[in-house]
Amino acid sequence: MTKTLVIAGHGPGISHAVAKRFGREGYALALVARNADRLTAAVEELARDNVVAKAFPGDVGDPAAVQQLVSDIRNTLGPIAILHWNAYSADVGDLLSDSPQELRRVFDVGVVSCVAAVQAALPDLKANQGAVLVTGGGYASFDETIDTMIVDSNAMGLGLMKAAQRKLVGILNRRLASEGIFAGQVLVLGTVKGTPFHSGEGGIEPDAVAEQFWSLFTARRGATAVCRDA
């Protein structure tokens, strides 16, 4: 039976590289994001490489909708073996001026909905000895230099969310191990080519991050791998 990889927050960078890498291994792909046109284009590209993929437009900032989405994916593509959480929100720049409601949504996108998806997919993940894979970043680091960068970049909400997400993965790694499920993250320390954050100089290749995810998943040793800009 075909196993399904759900990619929440699919885009042109890391998540699409992950789709191609795991697609080569025979996984069916459920691509989730708000932009239906981009999802359709990604599905068509993957189909040219004989990868089974389907678009599931939706808002991962709504935890209840995410749980229904997981059910829809299971009914359409089959059992869910892997959740890849690549979704994030950078809506909150300044903690002193942006609203608490906006900050709550940032956490819904990056943390709460991830937990909702894990709960909804848990029977499948257990049956398949599956995995929860999360895209982490340098903003999660507890470091004064990083904190200054976050403030100067007006990315305070994202910094808080990434720190919480890193702790979430560590907890899930311990909690899910007894169920035969692996949880891990790749910390991306630098900007990724082909994403809005990339300035055009240097940068990390998305395929390199995808390969780290594949190695992390197959080895299932330790909760964190690091991919950094050379």
Image (spheres, grey):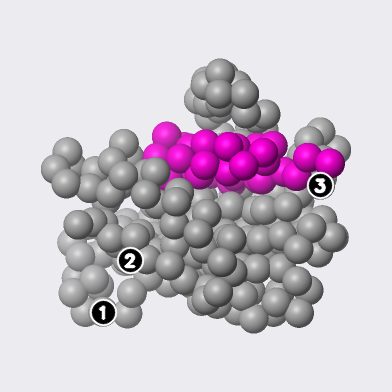
Q: Position of residue 127 (x, y in %)?
A: 84, 60
Q: Quadrant of the N terminus?
A: top right
Give the residue type at disc 2: Tyr
CB atoms of marks 3 and 1 within 8 Å: no
Please tell me which residue is depicted at 81% across the width and 64% down the height of the picture.
126
CB atoms of marks 2 and 1 within 8 Å: no
Nearer to us: label 3 or label 2? 3
Please tell me which residue is depicted at 28% across the width and 60% down the height of the picture.
228
- Count neighbours of disc 1 (C-alpha within 10 A) and say few if under 14, some if 14 to 19, many if 20 or more: few
Gap between marks 3 and 2, in whole Å? 33 Å
Q: Nearer the viewer, residue 4 or 163?
A: 4
Viewer can see residue 29: yes
Q: Quadrant of the C terminus?
A: bottom left
Gap between marks 2 and 1, in whole Å? 9 Å
Gap between marks 3 and 1, in whole Å? 40 Å
Q: Which mark is residue 79?
A: 3
Q: Which mark is residue 139?
A: 2
Q: Position of residue 147 (x, y in %)?
A: 25, 72
Give the residue type at disc 3: Pro
Q: Image height check: is 134 above or below 35?
A: below
CB atoms of marks 3 and 2 within 8 Å: no
Q: Which residue is mark 1?
A: 143
Q: Which residues are magenta?
A: 1-29
The answer to whether residue 50 is magenta is no
